[in-house]
Amino acid sequence: MGDIKSAREIAMEKLARLDATTEEERLQWKFVPRGQELAVRYLKEDCNLIAELAEYGEEERKYIVQGAGEVLLRNIGLPMNDAARRTNKHVMDGFKLLKNDKASVENVYSLIRQIFSHYTEQGEQQRKQAYEQLKTQFATRMQQAAQQQFGTAVRIRNDFERHPQFQEEWRKVLTQLDRPYLQNLAEYRSELQSIP
């Protein structure tokens, strides 16, 4: 069996590790969460990011920007509806304010906009086709199952789109269709994070 340590010994070990931390780590621990809180306020209340950042010194601002950037980037998503498109625009506008190299940010944004455009145009067509195909396949399976169970003269109702199994299969198809868009979006998010 291992050594059993007293609460005092455990506390002393933690204190020793805390003393070993650098000033940079302490600043990061303190100001990254503040940056995350700032980004949440920006998203919910539309506060002025520039004015909020001006309240901090250069050293702290670096960590505030890091935390805020992380939250903002997580909120860029596929433009599934008008609300998502508005959120994306708001997030992208805010993120651009945080970065010094605005040209690089705009270059990545143009790639993201291409993904969004493809998703809303060709992607919408793909989703409609996949939905109709799934609907046809599901109706055929339901009809066959009903005929096997009740005989050949049985007809099924056409409201199977509300059926939980249909909904589950549709979610799986949507996930599969969205996967390439989300992978590209993740790459561009990490590229944006690395821009100074």
Image (cartoon, helix red, strand yellow):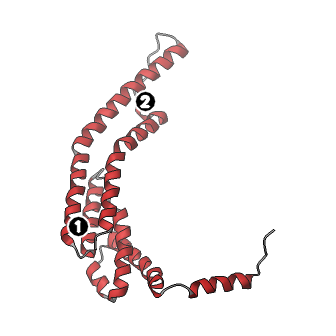
Which of discs 1 and 2 lies nearer the camera? The answer is 1
Left or right of residue 143: residue 2: right
- Precedes in sequence: disc 1 or disc 2: 1
Q: Which mark is residue 160?
A: 2
Question: As shown in the figure, which amino acid type bears the numbered disc 1?
Answer: Val
Q: Judging from the image, what secondary structure is the residue with disc 2 in?
A: helix
Give percent across and percent down for residue 2: 78, 71
For label 1, the SS is helix
Please rate how many residues cluster around mark 2, counting C-alpha atoms within 10 Å: few if below 14, some from 14 to 19, many from 20: some
Q: Quadrant of the C terminus?
A: bottom left
Q: At 21% across and 50% down in the image, what residue appears? A: 117
Judged left or right of residue 115, residue 175 is right
Circles 1 and 2: CB distance less than 8 Å? no
The N terminus sits in image quarter? bottom right
Q: Is residue 89 above or below residue 174?
A: below
* Mark 1 and mark 2: Cα distance apart in space: 46 Å
Q: Is residue 64 visible?
A: yes
Residue 25 lies, in percent from the top left, at 47, 82
Check residue 105 in the rendering and tell me which mark sits there, or answer none. Answer: 1
Question: Nearest the camera: 21 or 48?
Answer: 21
Give the residue displayed 38% in from the left and 79% down from the top.
Answer: 63
Q: Residues within 10 Å of mark 1 (few under 14, many from 20)?
A: many
Please provide percent x and percent y for residue 5.
Answer: 76, 79
The image shows residue 43, relative to residue 113, as above or below, that is below
Q: Quadrant of residue 68?
A: bottom left
> In the rendered image, is residue 48 in sight?
no
